[in-house]
Image (spheres, rainbow, N blue to C red):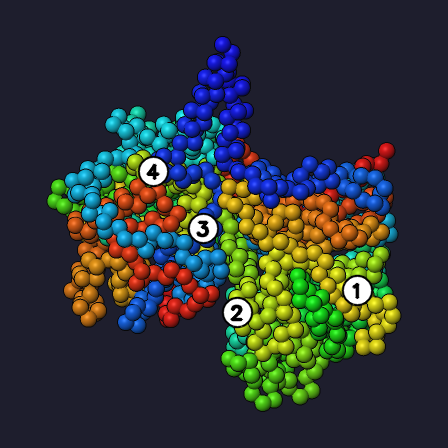
């Protein structure tokens, strides 16, 4: 009797605890090219990947497998992966003597963008770290010619001292000229700097150890830039900051095939969309910076708008570095006053509403260059560009359709029409031109931007986006409390808070990675750009973790990979021992697409 | 025949099923559920207190928790939470609806005799002195089995509350369980018995702290020295001990430069300047091997706390004492070492998350069986009464209720409260290593602030009340004049003896016991578990606006 009892008992118990609603169905369950949405504790705590990937370019289904290359804290070649250092190259330690490793442990920040770069037959990997004192590490890799398996064989710290150190490095890309283009997010608000102590807020103030503990030696304008690492033929890294690409909360800069035009996303509330046109192809050291004006033509869903580009200024890195090195102050660039409740400003001042709040600004005479490049977002608002975007994230280019894709984590706050979460609220549109007027969607959206095929008279670029429209929006959903998916508040059959995105050229496939609290596990999706539909749920990462650096590597010596960096993963399943599930390092790894070579 | 057999089988199965899912003791609440009815449950009900009363008078109980943190507590800018209800949007509506309920009728239905008898009867031990929960957990009821594996994977209570003269607990067979009782000054507010409960806190270090070497016998003297070393690291001061021969331990405990007889643990710790501290015995070896760590303000890996929250017991004279009956049994274990760097990095990420995504609720991984992580290396777990008064495991959501206080506030030391408040070893009876059942709160002087003023008096002054909900009329009457000024005479008495403030009258004690008994019967702890009689409508917000100001002046430390 016992054997028959147990399954029936379990089945009844399951029925009792999870009533199945028809609209709760997992549309991707049962597909070999998808994973089912993780429902068991074990599934929620591991990296899951579909067994195979449907990829038209391969003309076949390809098996997928996940591999780790490096974990933070790992030692190699005398260096520790993720260890932060001060301006003198000395490892940062705390009062207890513990080394400061940017490792994502206990939910802290960790490694972010990672790129494979080939140089003269050698394969390298560059990783940037998202801590306040930023860090860049480079590993030399070994690729198994038979299996394609990748291992790190040497590690090197890339010093950023020539540009006052790094800061909260976020996403990036490999440029068409094979360099690593990185970023610094969340630029500190220079207007809040205490001139005596150098303090701004507890977040910024933690750069002090980089300067031997003296905050007065730091300057907020040192941070919030695009960075680039170029490898010499022998693999020696050359590092720089591209001041001419502007200063804001850089998610990333994405360079288009003309090697001159770059689109830059700004991550925060009330942010702007930027475009940079370099003077010379393959050289980002001088150019013109523009910000977009959203001219809404359709308010349905994620919306449709025409884009007008407003010129902020032209500069080169060298002249801006001189300005930055001279320890500038906000007051030298703008005069600032409180905005009235009705959004009005005193005479001579203009209302600007950005991530730093609503304020009235007046440009100091002759400070156009400083404003355009050191206070790019504020100056964009000052000149009438749209500063209403909410958490603008990943960018990728689709050469097959001449389209750019852009992830918007949420449609919220400034993107609503004098509302917050659908309720009347003036905070994010007060004093601004309120260009974006959409319905609140906490699950976010992916946009497409059509790229013109001719030189634009305003930007001078042959890759100017003139129209933006939503192609995919997440679906807010309330699951009943006894549903298998009760912990999710965005539909499990669609995206939630898209972050990193990557187009696979020649395939019509767009990979979308999430950074969300509305799906219990962050997911990776495959979106068909032809049918405008999600076709597969490709992977999921452990509960509470964040996936970054989702990049399609179409051909590395005949192998195909998708890189994947997993920050603060909440523990792997370990049934025998109670562990703190948050006590885990972050890992940098990849999904191998396809079989081993025969 | 076969059909009859089959029907019997099905009937049998159904009866097993209904037994398996018997939720009578929790009034239908399935404690195994991971679904959060109130995902913001980690923000405790006290945080919803109205800081300005109807007369415009300001009350600041917030500063007690939200204060400028001291490393390695890196909670950033915590004191600013005194100034505004900076709740994530989903927490703006107060989920603790029990606070607005009227328990006066339920209270009036329980007689004094009934409640006294109830409170006196232990729900921890059975009549034979066995630990009830331990027996139940070994034979796990289906309604407690979260993952259906038939096994309990969390803490099994193993303390006998039989303490020797050093505060060490012993099992009936005489062996030391490792649990050590200590006396402390209760944290201001809710944890004062006058606000509803008595409690005790016990600490335990891993077995290695009682061993000279692996495989040896547990040595209580060695263990107590290690406890004092931990005390020195947490309180950041030198700690007196019974004289010990340092040669036997191979360590200069009093840091006088030679190995001799030491009668104190000298606290000198600045590893970057070469000033190090160490444990003794096997733990010292593990420290050297990197398997254990030591740092100011942090407990070693494997440290456990056991905290029983109890009813207000009454002795023969009607004075309030620790009751045998537990309301809750709370447990914490440090399962991972979080270095200063890791804690710092985590605090910064939390701060930025709060800034960029203020609507997002915090998440605390874990489960009902394994406990919930505070994301700083500790796992928390709890047991609470079922409707009949027996202890049962807390659900994930009920446990989540602990996490707000044990993670991101400035007032804690390594996420904990009591041990940093242990009575001063150089002054207290038995160096503070005793259980409240041996000696109560009477005669304990008021803890002092740096400027010499009284810590509790400051709470009364800033809060104009004895608790967060301002529902304690007894304290109000005793300590404040009708015009609201503090009575100097009472404050002077308080300086010498904290029990004058902390212990309620027997009448108040009985009322609070009854009110909590009514809460227990309802089993709706997720809607609030603070005992009260009249609805707290006047002093607690039902709903808040985003970033609503408290109108309080920030008290930095």
Element at badge 2?
strand
**Mark seen at residue A450:** 1
Q: How many C-alpha atoms fall within 10 Å of the one at disc 1: few (<14), some, or many (≥20)? A: many
Measured in 3D between alpha carbons, the distance from the residue under mark 4 to the one under mark 3, in whole angstroms, is 20 Å
**Mark seen at residue B38:** 3
Quadrant of residue A499 within the rendered picture: bottom right
Q: CB of mark 4 within 8 Å of CB of mark 2?
A: no
Q: Which of marks 4 and 3 is nearer the N terminus?
A: 3
Element at badge 4?
loop
Residue in view at x 79 percent, y 39 percent: A62
Residue receiving disc 4: B386
State the residue in front, A170 or A499. A499
Element at badge 1?
strand
Q: Mark 4 lies on which chain?
A: B
Q: Which of marks 1 and 2 is in front?
A: 2
Measured in 3D between alpha carbons, the distance from the residue under mark 1 to the one under mark 3, in whole angstroms, is 44 Å
Measured in 3D between alpha carbons, the distance from the residue under mark 4 to the one under mark 2, in whole angstroms, is 44 Å
């Amino acid at each position: 009797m016992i054997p028959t009892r147990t399954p029936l008992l379990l089945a009844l118990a399951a029925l009792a605890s999870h009533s199945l609603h028809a609209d709760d169905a997992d549309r991707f369950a049962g597909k070999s090219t998808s994973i089912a949405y993780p429902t068991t504790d074990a599934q929620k705590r591991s990296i899951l990947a579909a067994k195979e990937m449907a990829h038209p370019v391969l003309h076949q289904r390809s098996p997928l497998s996940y591999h780790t290359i490096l974990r933070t804290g790992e030692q190699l070649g005398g260096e520790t992966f993720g260890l932060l250092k001060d301006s003198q190259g000395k490892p940062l330690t705390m009062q207890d003597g513990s080394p400061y490793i940017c490792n994502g442990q206990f939910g802290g920040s960790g490694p972010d963008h990672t790129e494979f770069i080939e140089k003269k037959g050698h394969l390298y990997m560059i990783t940037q770290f998202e801590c306040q004192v930023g860090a860049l590490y480079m590993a030399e890799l070994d690729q198994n010619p038979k299996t394609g398996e990748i291992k790190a064989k040497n590690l090197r710290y890339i010093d950023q001292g020539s540009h006052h150190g790094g800061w909260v490095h976020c996403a990036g890309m490999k440029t068409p000229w094979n360099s690593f283009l990185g970023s610094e997010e969340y630029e500190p608000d220079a207007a809040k700097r205490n001139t005596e102590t150098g303090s701004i807020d507890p977040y910024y103030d933690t750069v002090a150890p980089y300067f031997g503990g003296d905050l007065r030696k730091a300057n907020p304008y040192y941070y919030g830039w695009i960075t680039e690492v170029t490898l010499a033929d022998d693999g020696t890294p050359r590092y720089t900051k591209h001041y001419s690409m502007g200063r804001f909360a850089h998610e990333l800069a994405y360079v288009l095939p003309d090697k001159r035009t770059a689109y830059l996303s700004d991550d925060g509330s009330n942010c702007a969309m930027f475009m940079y046109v370099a003077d010379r192809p393959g050289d980002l050291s001088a150019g013109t910076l523009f910000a977009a004006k959203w001219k809404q033509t359709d308010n349905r869903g994620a919306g449709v708008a025409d884009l007008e580009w407003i010129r902020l200024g032209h500069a080169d890195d060298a002249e801006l570095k001189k300005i930055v090195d001279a320890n500038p102050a906000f007051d030298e660039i703008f005069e600032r006053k409180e905005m009235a409740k009705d959004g009005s400003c005193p005479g001579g001042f203009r209302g600007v509403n950005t991530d730093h709040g609503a304020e009235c600004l007046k440009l100091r005479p002759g400070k156009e260059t400083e404003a355009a490049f050191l206070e790019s977002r504020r100056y964009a608002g000052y000149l009438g560009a749209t500063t209403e975007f909410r958490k603008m994230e990943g960018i990728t280019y689709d050469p097959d359709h001449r389209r750019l894709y852009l992830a918007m984590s949420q449609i919220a706050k400034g993107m609503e029409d004098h509302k917050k979460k659908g309720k009347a609220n003036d905070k994010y549109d007060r004093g601004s031109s309120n260009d974006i007027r959409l319905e609140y969607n906490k699950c976010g959206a992916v946009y497409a931007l059509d790229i013109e095929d001719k030189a634009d008279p305003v930007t001078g670029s042959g890759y100017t986006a003139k129209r933006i429209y939503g192609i995919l929006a997440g679906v807010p959903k309330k699951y009943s409390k006894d549903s298998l998916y009760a912990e999710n508040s965005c539909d499990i059959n669609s995206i939630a808070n898209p972050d990193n995105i990557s187009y696979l050229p020649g395939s019509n496939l767009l990979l979308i990675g999430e950074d969300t609290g509305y799906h219990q596990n962050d997911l990776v999706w495959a979106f068909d750009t032809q049918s405008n539909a999600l076709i597969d749920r490709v992977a999921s990462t452990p509960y509470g973790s964040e996936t970054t650096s989702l990049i399609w590597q179409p051909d590395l010596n005949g192998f195909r990979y998708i890189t994947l960096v997993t920050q603060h993963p909440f523990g792997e399943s370990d049934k025998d021992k109670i562990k703190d599930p948050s006590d885990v390092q972050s890992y940098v790894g990849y999904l191998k697409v396809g079989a081993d070579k025969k | 025949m076969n059909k009859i057999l089959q029907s019997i089988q099905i009937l049998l199965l159904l009866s097993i099923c209904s037994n398996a899912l018997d939720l009578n003791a929790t009034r239908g609440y399935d404690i195994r559920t991971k679904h959060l009815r109130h995902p913001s449950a980690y923000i405790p009900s006290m945080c919803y207190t109205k800081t300005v009363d109807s007369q415009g008078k300001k009350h600041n109980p917030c500063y007690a928790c939200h204060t400028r943190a001291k490393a390695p507590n890196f909670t950033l800018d915590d004191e600013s939470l005194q100034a505004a209800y900076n709740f994530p949007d989903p927490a703006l509506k107060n989920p603790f609806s029990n606070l607005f309920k009227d328990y006066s009728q339920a209270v009036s239905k329980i007689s004094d005799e009934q409640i006294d008898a109830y409170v006196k009867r232990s729900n921890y031990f059975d009549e034979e002195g066995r630990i009830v929960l331990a027996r139940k957990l070994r034979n796990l009821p289906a309604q407690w089995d979260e993952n259906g594996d038939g096994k309990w994977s969390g803490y099994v209570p193993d303390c006998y509350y039989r303490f020797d003269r050093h505060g060490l607990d012993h099992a009936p067979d005489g062996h030391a369980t490792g649990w050590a009782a200590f006396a402390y000054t209760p944290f201001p507010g809710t944890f004062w018995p006058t606000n509803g409960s008595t409690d005790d806190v016990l600490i335990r270090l891993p077995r290695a702290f009682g061993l000279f070497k692996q495989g040896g016998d547990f040595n209580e003297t060695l263990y107590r020295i290690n406890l004092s070393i931990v005390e020195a690291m947490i309180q950041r001061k030198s700690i007196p001990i019974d004289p010990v021969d340092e040669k036997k331990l191979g360590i200069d405990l009093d840091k006088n430069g030679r190995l001799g007889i030491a009668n104190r643990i000298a606290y000198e710790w600045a590893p970057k300047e070469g000033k190090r501290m160490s444990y003794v015995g096997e733990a010292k070896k593990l420290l050297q091997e990197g398997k254990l760590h030591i740092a100011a303000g942090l407990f070693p890996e494997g440290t456990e706390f056991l905290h029983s929250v109890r009813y207000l017991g009454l002795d023969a004279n009607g004075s309030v004492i620790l009751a045998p009956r537990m309301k809750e049994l709370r447990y914490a274990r440090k399962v991972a070492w979080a270095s200063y760097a890791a804690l710092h990095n985590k605090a910064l990420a939390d701060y930025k998350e709060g800034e960029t995504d203020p609507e997002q609720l915090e998440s605390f991984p874990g489960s009902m069986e394994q406990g919930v992580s505070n994301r700083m290396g500790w796992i928390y777990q709890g047991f609470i009464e079922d409707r009949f008064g027996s202890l049962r495991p807390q659900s994930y959501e009920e446990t989540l209720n602990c996490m707000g206080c044990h993670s991101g506030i400035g007032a804690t030391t390594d996420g904990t409260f009591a041990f940093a408040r242990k009575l001063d070893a150089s002054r207290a009876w038995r160096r503070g290593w005793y259980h409240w059942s041996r000696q109560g709160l009477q005669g304990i002087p008021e803890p002092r602030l740096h400027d010499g003023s009284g810590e509790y008096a400051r709470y009364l002054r800033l809060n104009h009340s004895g608790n967060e909900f301002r529902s304690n009329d007894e304290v109000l009457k005793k300590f404040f004049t009708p015009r609201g000024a503090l009575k100097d005479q009472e404050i002077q008495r308080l300086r010498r003896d904290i029990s004058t403030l902390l212990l309620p009258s027997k009448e108040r004690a009985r009322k609070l016991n009854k009110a909590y008994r009514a809460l227990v019967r309802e089993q709706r702890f997720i809607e609030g578990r603070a005992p009260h009689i009249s609805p707290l409508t006047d002093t607690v917000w039902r709903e808040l606006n985003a970033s609503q100001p408290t109108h309080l002046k920030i008290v930095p430390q």
